[in-house]
Image: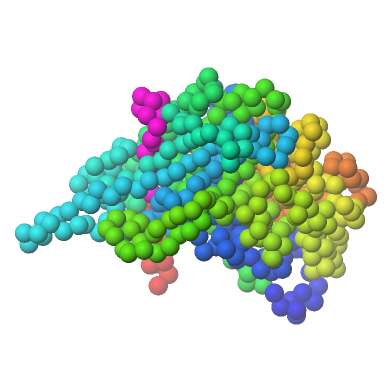
């Protein structure tokens, strides 16, 4: 961002609509997105890069008494990204952690491990058997789990650990749909309609009923490619905030002023629907959650052998390389020098990062760059409202008794879910206590919410230990201009939209027309 640009006067209406843009420049991160390439080290390992974490009371009809957990990985997938597409790392450990006693150490961990099996389908060419180069063999429509029309099959197992993950005993989760086995088929990515004619029906056949040890009721699981549910404006931010917005920030149209920059991207979702009682374990109604990914301590390159991962020789214990609870924490709160360290850390050690929350840089940056337009940073230090939002939960909403300050997403399971048609995209600050930051649903606009919270909107509501006078500009309608709402998503598990197909590709038709 040029110095000349920053010196230009910015009209108040535009400043309020554009304040999200300054997030892109000062942090040096490659993108303003919910943990898409959020730290220098993880940017080089997309298979274990967590993009978003969701935790909410299930709002599908007939599913009261369940909590849905969603951990998305492997960002910015191009639908046409063949021939290998986007399998998860079979050497990695993907985990979802739950705290139910107000502490900062996990009480329950769900561990996912993936396996890729190569059938090595061959064709006879000139009298010789030759291995095909594709993940599909073209013998039939891919329409069912473990289809013989696939050359590569991805499966996974789930273990649950009660107590700290380092010392607890893993217990296998059972696939009751298939008679109690401990493996689950994962659908192939959405290669295209010639390979998989009806992807929605095909993918839905991979929603499995599960029995979790220690739970009396049956849950559900789905792991597979989904359309990226996160909505944000990126590209124009990087082009010196090259955006035109409506004349007044009070005009709701400002929230529709631009497009979602990752509208053409897919991700891989790990989704669990778990009986609420299995998560709370009778310890109260409030739970905390986050997701992590870990890799073997050593991944040496060895002699290349036939197969899908023949050049890797993993050894040693696991090292955590990705962590995600509340959205946007590592992007806009944690300083650049500590981003890799945050991904490697655990909530119990979050005291080392507390200054980033109590004395945040973001509001000061917004005031510095847009102060002439009336943008003012809150004046209450330490920022108790941000401590409540990110580290303890909000008193009377989702703060558990005897809480230990630590960063994670927190959900009060006693607050009834709101049907999709009645959800407010601004969650708690929009009067919908079933939404973010009380958990997070797919339709919650966490970018707009967190911008407004950072600039003190909770103070204007007398929430978080501060008062309206502490937030001189807290009522401005800060927005990134990319709109999101519950109506964007299905109302049933697995809730996220099915992925964009590699073929036919509507973008290709547009590109051809422009040539």
Q: In which quarter of the image is residue 421?
A: top right
Q: Where is residue 477 in the image (x, y as percent from the top left)?
A: 77, 52
Residue shown at 71%/31% (left/top)?
101
Where, quadrant-wise, is the C terminus in this rendering? Answer: bottom left
Residue 464 is a magenta residue: no
| 359 to 5, vertically: above or below | above
| Colouring scheme, one of rainbow, by chain, secondary structure, one colour | rainbow
Count of labels in the image: 0
- Res. 443 in view: no
Query: Toward the viewer: 489 or 315?
Result: 315
**Farthest residue, direction right:** 469
Q: Position of residue 140 (x, y in %)?
A: 22, 44
Q: Where is residue 315 in the image (x, y as percent from the top left)?
A: 45, 54
Residue 179 is a magenta residue: yes
Q: Where is residue 251 in the image (x, y as percent from the top left)?
A: 74, 52
Residue shown at 77%/51% (left/top)?
351
Q: What stretch is highlighted in magenta?
A: 175-190
Query: Toward the viewer: 455 or 381?
Result: 381
**Is 131 on the left-hand or right-hand side of 67?**
left
Where, quadrant-wise, is the N terminus in this rendering? Answer: bottom right
Residue shown at 77%/40% (left/top)?
404
């Amino acid at each position: 961002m040029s110095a000349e640009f920053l010196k230009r006067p910015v009209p108040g209406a535009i400043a309020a609509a554009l304040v999200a843009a300054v997030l892109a420049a000062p942090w040096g991160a490659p993108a303003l997105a919910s943990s898409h390439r959020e730290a220098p080290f993880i940017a080089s390992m997309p298979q274990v890069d967590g993009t978003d974490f969701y935790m909410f009371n299930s709002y599908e009809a007939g599913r009261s008494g369940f909590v849905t957990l969603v951990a998305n990985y492997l960002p910015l997938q191009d639908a046409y990204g063949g021939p290998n597409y986007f399998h998860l790392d079979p050497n990695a450990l993907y985990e979802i952690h739950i705290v139910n006693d107000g502490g900062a150490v996990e009480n329950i961990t769900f561990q996912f491990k993936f396996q890729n099996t190569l059938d090595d389908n061959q064709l006879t060419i000139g009298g010789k058997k030759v291995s095909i180069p594709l993940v599909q063999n073209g013998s039939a429509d891919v329409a069912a789990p473990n289809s013989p029309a696939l050359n590569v099959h991805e499966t996974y197992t789930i273990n649950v650990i009660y107590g700290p993950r380092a010392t607890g005993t893993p217990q296998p989760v059972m696939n009751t749909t298939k008679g109690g086995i401990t493996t689950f088929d994962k659908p192939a990515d959405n290669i295209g309609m010639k390979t998989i004619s009806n992807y929605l029906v095909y993918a839905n056949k991979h929603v499995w009923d599960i029995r979790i040890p220690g739970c009396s009721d049956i849950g559900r699981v789905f792991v597979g490619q989904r359309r990226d549910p996160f909505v944000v404006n990126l590209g124009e931010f990087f082009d010196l905030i090259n955006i035109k917005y409506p004349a007044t920030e009070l005009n709701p149209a400002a929230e529709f002023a631009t497009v979602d920059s990752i509208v053409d991207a897919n991700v891989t979702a790990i989704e669990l629907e778990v009986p609420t009682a299995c998560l709370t374990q009778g310890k109260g109604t409030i739970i905390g959650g986050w997701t992590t990914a870990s890799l073997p301590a050593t991944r040496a390159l060895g002699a290349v052998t036939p197969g899908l991962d023949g050049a890797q020789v993993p050894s040693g214990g696991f090292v955590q390389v990705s962590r995600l609870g509340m959205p946007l924490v590592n992007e806009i709160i944690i300083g650049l020098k500590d981003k890799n360290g945050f991904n490697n850390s655990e909530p119990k050690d979050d005291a080392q990062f507390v200054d980033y929350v109590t004395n945040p840089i973001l509001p000061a940056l917004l005031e510095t760059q847009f102060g002439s337009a009336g943008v003012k940073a809150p004046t209450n230090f330490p920022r108790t409202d941000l401590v409540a939002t990110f580290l303890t939960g909000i008193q009377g909403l989702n703060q558990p008794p005897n809480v230990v300050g630590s960063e994670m997403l927190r959900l009060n399971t006693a607050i009834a879910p709101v049907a999709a048609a009645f959800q407010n995209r601004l969650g708690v600050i929009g009067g919908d206590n079933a939404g973010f930051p009380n958990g997070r649903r797919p339709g919650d606009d966490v970018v707009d919410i967190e911008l407004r919270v950072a600039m003190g909107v909770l103070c204007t509501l007398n929430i978080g230990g501060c008062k309206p006078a502490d937030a001189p500009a807290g009522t401005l309608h800060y927005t990134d201009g990319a709109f999101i709402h519950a109506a964007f998503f299905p109302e049933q598990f697995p809730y996220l939209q099915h992925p964009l197909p590699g073929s036919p590709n509507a973008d290709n038709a547009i590109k051809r027309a422009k040539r």
